[in-house]
Image (spheres, rainbow, N blue to C red):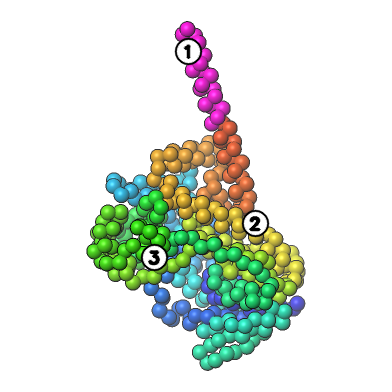
Amino acid sequence: MTERDEIAVVGAGLAGCLLACYLARRGYPVALYERRPDPRTGTVERGRSINLALSERGLDALRRIGLEDEVTADALPMRGRMIHPVEGAPEFQSYSGSGDRAINSISRGALNNALLDAAAALPNVRVAFDHRLVGLDPLGGGMTFETPQGKVTATASVVLGADGAGSAVRGQLLAYGGVTESLDFLDYGYKELTIPPLGGEFALDPGALHIWPRGTSMMIALPNPDRSFTCTLFWPTHGTRSFASLSSPAAIERFFATHYPDLVPLAPNLVDDYQHNPVGVLGTVRCTPWQVAGKVGLIGDAAHAIVPFYGQGANCAFEDVVELDRCLDECDDEWAAALPLFQHRRQDNAEAIARMALANFVEMRDKVASPVFRTRKQVEHALERALPGRYVSQYELVSFSTTPYAQVRRRVRAQYAVVGAVAAGAVALLAGGVRAALGRRR
């Protein structure tokens, strides 16, 4: 393949725009297709922003092409969780043992626009909006798109699907018989609310990710540059404490006054937001293989969408782009070798973060408010300070390093085994000392 062969990237979201930048840097002409109108000039869909928590994996990908500073100019660092109980004062829990490491709250829309600007500014990238993929020839690279002007066709040497969890490219490969998929949806949905600025300032501490854990459900809030907060409810879709159970304004007000009392005075548009913002779905997408014939490949959520509870969806997708770039280096830009190698390198890691994200949902909604959890975190941070580099918590490894996700899981299991053995030994020594003391008294 020569650098004159055009690569098609379907999906001008976060992963697609970053991928276009990386491919253009390698000398490829890139056609970037997006089913939506240009998001930089259109109206943002109500209740669909979901702020991102951009951490080291995502920052590393941006840093490699000189976009970190530009993209993070308006990011707000969050150094820990602020836990809001039903009664009593909020409690801050640091993300790191040192207390100085932070994840970054950033608007998905603002990040997408910045990456789209960066891609569109490159001379060998062309962007086509209002192009919805409705046909794909995986072997020949032929594509058919529906546009406002009617159907159009295009051809590319390689087609890369970066078009999210509901990927049209993956759908075409399923119809072709090239891949299989599994979709595991939670019995939970999400809905967004807004806390506006209070007197021109943040109504809550902007240096924290705020969590209202409520057992089988929760709400989180992330700060925005305009000093508002975007709140996201993660509730069951059915039952007495679900989205389906609240309909009238009076019922909504009573429920929030009972379960989220500190939110009510901060959210004057609570009822309107609740009634009119949509409920989104949450689930995990798995498929295999991620490529067909070295001609069509899937990347990011199109290959392995995860639930958002570790804040790693975009970070993981950005890391995919870095790994694909690395595979192209190692394979001398032979796509037929690079795409299978990319899947081999990333699939176990994608599965590892999918499992950790599901587990973190339970932690965030059920455990963060418990004394046992707080004690465990204190012990963990103490071990990190006492054994720097040797004991590192799962959260730090996931959010503040680029250690492969699968390796994180293995390392954390080993650390827990050692800590458990040390704790058991300490208990045994203590019990032995007590028995010896009792024996002397006799």
Dot 1, how many residues are within 10 Å of its Cα: few (below 14), some (14-19), or many (20+)?
Answer: few
Among the 4 quarters of the image, the one containing residue 184: bottom right
**Residue lying at 48% horizontally and 37% vertically, measured from the top left:** 379
Dot 2, how many residues are within 10 Å of its Cα: few (below 14), some (14-19), or many (20+)?
Answer: some
The vertical placement of 65 against 142, above or below, is above
Image coordinates of residue 229 in percent, x first then y, are 35, 62
Is 251 or 106 nearer to us in this picture? 251
What residue sits right under mark 2 in the picture? 348
**Residue lying at 73% horizontally and 73% vertically, measured from the top left:** 293
Image coordinates of residue 404 in percent, x first then y, are 62, 54
Image coordinates of residue 239 in percent, x first then y, are 38, 59
Q: In this orientation, does residue 223 appear?
A: no
Label 1, secondary structure: give it: helix
Magenta span: predominant SS is helix
Is 300 or 168 nearer to us in this picture? 168
> Sequence order check: which comes first, mark 3 or mark 1?
3
Say whether residue 424 is magenta.
yes
What residue sits right under mark 3 in the picture? 191
Dot 3, how many residues are within 10 Å of its Cα: few (below 14), some (14-19), or many (20+)?
Answer: many
What amino acid is at disc 3?
Answer: Lys
Relative placement, left or right, of 435 versus 43 is right
Gap in Å between the C-alphas at discs 3 and 1?
Answer: 60 Å
Q: In this orientation, does residue 144 appear?
A: yes
Among the 4 quarters of the image, the one containing residue 134: bottom right
What residue sits right under mark 1 in the picture? 438
CB within 8 Å, label 1 to label 2: no
Query: Which segment did they paint magenta?
Result: 423-442
Is 289 or 4 nearer to us in this picture? 289
**Residue lying at 68% horizontally and 59% vertically, measured from the top left:** 345
Q: Residue furthest front?
A: 239
